[in-house]
Amino acid sequence: MTLTSLLAQGSEATGAGLALALAAHHAGRDATRDELLRGAMQTFGSIARDPDDALLYWFALSAYGALGVGEPEGLEVNVGGGWQPVTLEEGRAVVDVNLSPGGRLRAKVRTTGGAVVYARVETVFGAAFEERSDAPFTLSIAGDVGRLGGVAGLVLEVTAGEEAVQQPVIELQLPAGVPDDEVPPGRARCARGGALRRGARCPGFVRLTLAPLNAEQRHSVPLSFVRTSASPVRGLGAGGLRGQLPHARMTVLLPRVLTPSAS
């Protein structure tokens, strides 16, 4: 049975492994516990889709100290170029990798100090923006860039075409110097703009999951941020797709140069 088929089964097998690991921990059989934990962690990603009882056993193992106590003394990753130390910032570390088209890459993580770390690897493909209009909605940005020290008054317009869109998703490139918690500015403004969820994706990008759009309906998402640099900066490229399925149709809005007004 392959790892892919195990993941497709959901978290039932993972939960069973974690339950046995908890029993082994209480019985003082540390070696058996560790072996069961290593096996369960191979399919731990399925818990995100189907929590079931697996998450409960994970929290129980943590509470009883079976996963180690405290922060690891060191953390290293290997993504094909040898082991390199990384520092977590808010639980996340970013590592640049080079991968040729059609190539494969395996990420490895190791710690020192006895603590257990659950590593979730998220890959982001970096490529130049290429204008596209395949998704069933259009993207446009209008408004005032603002002056130095002032607030930009820009709006992202998301407009459906002749068909409804159940889950529009926008990946927005932030201008240099703008933190990912400023755009959109706060939950109230976010809700009025049609955005249901937002989250940082990778340095310089934020993902917006919008409310469903009826045919020819429009969402106006405010892009208000403070200009902290007098120099022109490039940003606000956007990619929009329906849902989060691979190979989904996409509409891409090219980045622009943002120059603050003189007054």
Image (tube, helix red, strand yellow):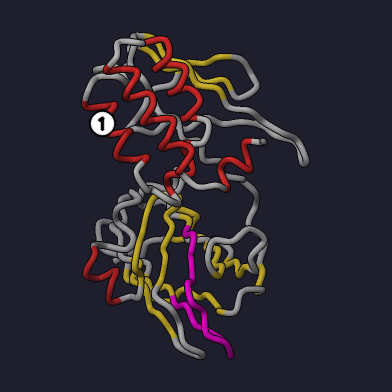
Q: Which residue is mark 1?
A: 60
At horizontal 43% and vertical 78% (from top left) the residue drawn is 212
Q: Nearer the viewer, residue 49 or 101?
A: 49
**Magenta stretch containing residue 158, yes or no?**
yes
At horizontal 37% and vertical 40% (from top left) the residue drawn is 54
Q: Position of residue 51 (x, y in %)?
A: 38, 48
Quarter of the figure that contains the N terminus: top right
Q: Position of residue 193 (x, y in %)?
A: 33, 75
Q: Residue 86's image quarter?
A: top left
Quarter of the figure that contains the C terminus: bottom left
Q: Residue 150's image quarter?
A: bottom left
**Magenta stretch containing residue 240, yes or no?**
no
Q: Nearer the viewer, residue 189 or 236?
A: 189
Q: Is residue 97 above or below residue 142?
A: above
In magenta, the rendered stretch is: 157-172
Amino acid type of the residue that numbered disc 1 sits on in the rendered structure: Ala
Q: Position of residue 171 (x, y in %)?
A: 49, 59
